[in-house]
Image (tube, rainbow, N blue to C red):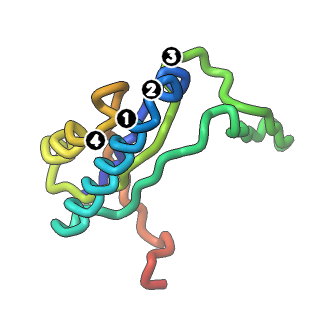
């Protein structure tokens, strides 16, 4: 089953960390992706640019509304993701515990709903 691990943390606190620590965390994340790949569990992963670079897209009554950045008041922002295969929820949680971002923020574990008819890499 596929799971999305959403990594959230405080962007300001992360930027305030020493650059060497940020680089070590990134390298640890890369190593984790290789470990998952070797077990056939890796599908995709990536850090995200800061929330200030985001736009929100809505359609209301048929009219598009595009606004800058997130307007949700929160201490943590979405910082990146891992898309993985895991045999069950417990295994997905075990992988989430290994994500470096879990030490400074939160990793949300969400199962994906499989929808037939979507394009695949083979298409």
Q: Are marks 2 and 4 in contact (CB under 8 Å)?
A: no
Q: Nearer the viewer, residue 96 or 49?
A: 49
Q: Which mark is residue 83?
A: none
Q: Which mark is residue 75?
A: 3
Give the residue drawn at x 31%, y 46%.
111
Give the residue drawn at x 46%, y 36%.
19
Residue carrying label 2: 17
* Residue neighbourhood size for the residue with mark 1, other residues' Cα within 10 Å, grouped as few (<14), some (14–19), many (≥20): few
**Alpha carbon of mark 3 to alpha carbon of mark 4: how far?**
19 Å
Give the image location of residue 44, x and y in percent. Answer: 39, 60
Q: Secondary structure at mark 2?
A: loop
Q: Which mark is residue 21?
A: 1
Q: Nearer the viewer, mark 2 or mark 4?
A: 2
* Residue neighbourhood size for the residue with mark 3, other residues' Cα within 10 Å, grouped as few (<14), some (14–19), many (≥20): few
Give the residue drawn at x 44%, y 26%.
17
Q: Secondary structure at mark 1?
A: helix
**Alpha carbon of mark 2 to alpha carbon of mark 4: how far?**
17 Å
Give the image location of residue 61, x and y in percent. Answer: 82, 37
Q: Secondary structure at mark 4?
A: loop
For the N terminus, the image quarter is: bottom left
Which label's residue is closer to the chain start, 3 or 4?
Answer: 3
Q: Are marks 2 and 1 in contact (CB under 8 Å)?
A: yes
Question: In this rendering, would 75 be left or right of 98?
Answer: right
Q: Nearer the viewer, residue 4 or 42?
A: 42
* Residue neighbourhood size for the residue with mark 2, other residues' Cα within 10 Å, grouped as few (<14), some (14–19), many (≥20): few
Which label's residue is closer to the chain start, 3 or 2?
Answer: 2
């Amino acid at each position: 089953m596929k799971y999305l691990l959403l990594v959230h943390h405080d962007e300001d606190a992360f930027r305030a960390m020493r650059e060497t620590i940020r680089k070590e965390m990134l390298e640890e994340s890369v190593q984790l992706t290789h470990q998952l790949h070797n077990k056939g569990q890796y599908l995709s992963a990536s850090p995200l640019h800061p929330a200030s670079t985001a736009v929100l897209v809505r359609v209301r009554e048929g009219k598009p509304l595009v606004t800058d950045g997130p307007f949700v008041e929160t201490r943590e922002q979405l910082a990146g993701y891992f898309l993985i295969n895991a045999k069950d929820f417990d295994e997905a949680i075990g992988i989430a515990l290994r994500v470096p971002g879990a030490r400074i923020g939160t990793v949300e574990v969400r199962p994906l709903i499989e929808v037939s008819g979507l394009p695949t890499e083979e298409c």
